[in-house]
Image (tube, grey):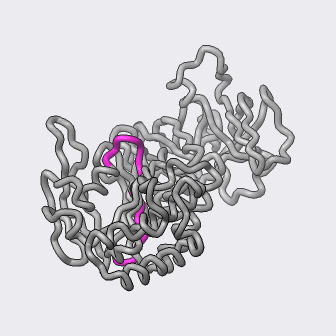
Amino acid sequence: MGEVNLEHVSKQYDDVTAVDDMNLEIKDGEFITLVGPSGCGKSTTLETIAGLTIPTDGTISIAGREVTTLPPKDRGIAMVFQNIALFPHMDVYDNISFGLRLRKYDTDEVDRRVDRAAEIVQLEGMLDRMPDEMSGGQRQRVAIARAIVRDPEVFLMDEPLANLDAKLRVHMRTELQRLQKELDATIIYVTHDQAEAMTMSDRVAVINQGELQQFDPPLVCYNEPKNLFVAGFIGSPSMNFVEGTIDANGLATEDYHVQFDPGQLSGVAPDDEVTMGVRPEDVYLLDDADDVANPTDTISARTDVLEPMGDEIFVYLLTGGASSEGMDAEADDSHQLLMSVDPDKDIETDQEVEVILDRERIHLFDTETGDAIAHGLEFASVGTGATGTEAEGDD
């Protein structure tokens, strides 16, 4: 069985904490991805599971057996690295079987395991080839086959696709998913590429500065991020963030008002500062308002930059009469929205537009702590318009 448990695992290097109180409970047969920016501690976490690094604190168990201080060879794991590291003077058969021959397996067993691994990764007929006669994807499959013959409890993969070109990475993502289903294996996969994390994983562990931020299925991380970091890291392009203040009728930003019922928010009071998050696909042109069940009031904006992507166009919008000239990054964030529209939309740069937000897809976060407050907002029966004035008459 390939269960893996990390309990309060930490790794300290002098005054640097690479992993801070990591707790993960990984089920047998799961495909788990550790994802985060460079230097966040994901590879160090994987190395503690592999036994390449001994944690400063905490315990690690694999298949119900504590392995915290055991050497890698005794843990029942196999690793696939970013650097494929095949022996250039050995053919495919010898590369795959090298570890088995070191352990003195008999010839018939070595042949059986190599043939099975080659069949799984579709390398039949290539066992006599040398590494320099193979493509990058084929060499990567040799490295995976070398891990398969170990018949491990757990596969550990540290950015194994990072050195492949974009088209081959997409192909190998599919191959790894097929492999995992065929072997019914537990795979712990490290990447900084969120597309790999979203498409391949049963659950995603989002890590930042050595701390676990969220450990959930990919779509939960996408639709219900626990904090600002997860919301900004998961999703490409990134979520829009705009700071504002809670009032009696919703959220007042510097450029517009988002009307909703503040009474739905637990622990939030008028004048509290919050950060609104909305994804580009949840920003719509006013012409598409019929596609949104619960739209906000209109927001006046001007198109700044267009990025045609083929199947969609990313449109950078400036709000509140802002100009892109002379604006610093912080100002850009507070006066800018990124919108995704269909490629057939007739839209140009420096064009005045009216847009709306999908109220049910708006996220609110505590500006100070970054913690999520709400995912989706409810319409306020008495509220403000886009200018922040009362919608109803005076008493």
Q: Is residue 238 above or below residue 291?
A: above
Relative horizontal placement of residue 185, taking residue 128 as reference (left or right) = left
Identify the residue at horizontal 48%, vertical 63% (top origin). Answer: 91
Q: Main secondary structure of the magenta part?
A: loop
Identify the residue at horizontal 41%, vertical 72% (top origin). Answer: 148
Relative horizontal placement of residue 2, taking residue 343 as reference (left or right) = left
Relative horizontal placement of residue 221, taking residue 22 as reference (left or right) = right
Asked whether residue 9 is in view, the answer is yes
In which quadrant of the rendered view does residue 146 lie? bottom left
Residue 336's spot in the image, x, y percent? 61, 32
In which quadrant of the rendered view does residue 77 lie? bottom left
Seen from the viewer's position, the closer of residues 28 and 339 is 28
Q: Is residue 36 magenta?
A: yes
Q: How many marks?
A: 0
Kindly give the residue lying farthest to the top in the view shown. Answer: 326
Asked whether residue 383 is in view, the answer is no
Provide the residue span drawn in magenta.
27-41
Seen from the viewer's position, the closer of residues 33 and 88 is 88
Residue 202's spot in the image, x, y percent? 46, 69
Q: Is residue 203 above or below residue 159?
A: below
